Image: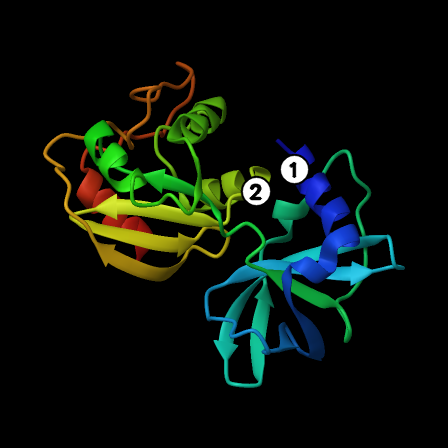
Amino acid sequence: MKFLFALFMAIVSIYASSFKSEKVLEMKESEIEISNKNGIKVGQSGFLFRDFDTKNGSILAVATVIKTDNQKAIVKVENSDYLKQSSLPTLKSNISKGDTFFFDVYSNRALLITPNQDSYITISKNLKEYSLIHPDIFSSYLMANNKLSPTISSFKEFCMDNSVGTLFIANENVLHKLDCLSFYEMNKYSVNFKQDEFISPFYSRVGELEVNWFVFGEKRVDNYSEFYKNLIR
């Protein structure tokens, strides 16, 4: 799935003007000040990008908006491990004035986490404006990494690898909408669905996850409600 990341780099270089973006104005220690002409919101994630010329450029870092006002915003660089690509050269460069912060790039691609099939069908019908990535793919990712339950890091890594910008988690008649790379809750909605039964750790056609026999320390999700309450905090 890493090719999606490389593809994004190529697309940004060619079609940068079609994405929402802000310019880097100033560096303040570990924080980066950017313009705020497009109503950027706290919690939104994006990519800090540098143009080398009219056709070439590179992503410098993943960053999250942590403060905003009417004219400026502050972003903080996320874990750089999300950008490690074995097939691509590593760019060693500091972020500087004039670089670009692209955001909302993958916000229409979403992963929906629900307790069971009925809730998945009910909720997905109301998310037609999103391109939903089926939870089967995330289940397969977890099993490939010998995980019985998701973590914030596994969600972020999966979303980065698969160009997913939005994460929905349904729990106790509330649909939480999160930015998948920052794991910041952007909104929440009241929804009606049955949660009496659940598949651990979430609904997928893969069923309950299994790991290799020699993997120790992994625990199943025994209480869907409490697990995702604690995860979203």
Near mark 2 (Cα within 10 A), the count class, few <14, some 14-19 or many ≥20, is many
For residue 126, side relative to residue 54 (left or right): left
- Nearer to me, 214 or 18: 18
How far is the residue under mark 1 from the one under mark 2?
7 Å
Image quarter in which the C terminus is found = bottom left
Secondary element under disc 2, as helix, strand or loop, is: loop
Q: Position of residue 148 (x, y in %)?
A: 35, 28
Quadrant containing the N terminus is: top right
- Residue underneath mark 2: 163
Label 1 secondary element: helix
Q: Which amino acid is tagged 2? A: Ser
**Residue, disc 1:** 4
Q: Is residue 41 left or right of residue 188?
A: right
Q: Quadrant of residue 207?
A: top left
Q: Is residue 204 above or below residue 233?
A: above
**Image height check: is 206 above or below 153?**
above
Residue 76: which quarter of the image?
bottom right
Hey, what amino acid is under mark 1?
Answer: Leu
Residue furthest left in the image: 196
At a point 19% along the width and 43% down the height, the residue shown is: 225
Residue 2 vertical placement versus 185 (above, below): above
- Please state the horizontal and vertical placement of residue 89, each as a whole percent of the image: 82, 42
Other-residue count near label 1 (Cα within 10 Å), few / some / many at <14 / 14–19 / ≥20: few
